[in-house]
Amino acid sequence: MSTSPLAALPNSRTEEDGSAVIRVLSYNIRSMRDDTDALARVIAACAPDLVLVQEAPRFFRWRKKLARLARAADLVILSGGGTAAGPALLCSLRATVERTEDVLLPLTPGLHRRGFATAVVRFGDARLGVLSCHLSLQGEERYAQGGLLLDRLAGMGVDHAVAGGDLNERPRGRTFRRLTETLQDCWATSPWGGEHTSTPGDPHQRIDAILATPGVEVLGCGVPAGLPGVTEAELRAATDHLPVLAALRVPPAPVSPGR
């Protein structure tokens, strides 16, 4: 895994036209069973406005564990965790929260319960739907969950949205392709940093992704190995996946009549 210096990724900011440049991080944290200090340092170094978490703590004192991670990374809990069967959302204080919803997906007997952590947030005049997911290891269930993800985004009542997570599938897989028929694969749209997300010790496959609706401009997306403050040792210690970081430009929401 190369950790040579990366080209600069745009920082968060608000543009003159009201659009918002935001940083979105997607990260499978393996229930915080590894080095949580390293995990928090990696997240903080990425300076995210939103963190789409997979495998957040789900059981005993899970809220306390997730809150401790958020605090260490200078973030707050937005939604999810145990109530979404693992996916969670963290955010910076830059985000204004409109609403959140944790969604449990249909349970296939003998398989793990899956869910979505979702929210609608604003960054100034820009309004964004957000969804974190961890799709099934089983192909048929995963494909169905991909359809539910698209339905959920379409039903959020927003013009722009971002989804991300552990898809448990490479880009040529049929669920991945189903998603990218509608959504932008942010890495493929504007590659930056590293591509492969699994595993930290031997990155050889991309099974984690950030996806965005067509109106969102992707300014760069990839594994932030080599970003200042993100070292190979920290990435190996933090969890068993590599994170995906994207810089996105979200257009301002249309002005309602009468405003």
Image (cartoon, grey):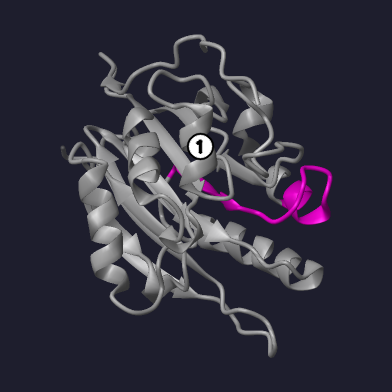
- Residue 202, position as x, y percentages in the image: 71, 38
User: Please, is residue 229 above or below residue 96 in the view?
Assistant: above
Q: Is residue 96 visible?
A: no
User: Which residue is more in the foreground, 204 or 123?
Assistant: 204
Q: Residue at x 31, y 23 (%)?
A: 12
User: Please, is residue 259 above or below residue 136 in the view?
Assistant: above
User: Which residue is more in the foreground, 254 or 240?
Assistant: 240
217 lies left or right of 256: right
Q: Residue at x 35, y 67 (%)?
A: 101
Q: Is residue 60 visible?
A: yes
Residue carrying label 1: 235
Mark 1 residue element:
helix
Q: Residue at x 72, y 67 (%)?
A: 137
Looking at the image, how many numbered discs can be counted on the residues? 1
What is the crowding at mark 1: few (fewer than 14 residues within 10 Å), some, or many (at least 20)? Answer: many
User: Which residue is more in the foreground, 101 or 28?
Assistant: 28
- Residue 21, position as x, y percentages in the image: 35, 24
Image quadrant holding the C terminus, namely top left
Is residue 163 a member of the stretch shown in magenta? yes
- Residue 53, position as x, y percentages in the image: 44, 53
Image quadrant holding the N terminus, namely top right
Q: Amino acid at mark 1?
A: Leu
- Residue 187, position as x, y percentages in the image: 63, 30
Q: Which residues are magenta?
A: 159-178
Q: Residue at x 55, y 27 (%)?
A: 221
Is residue 248 a member of the stretch shown in magenta? no
Residue that protrudes farthest toward the bottom in the picture? 109
Q: In terms of image quadrants, where is residue 254?
A: top left
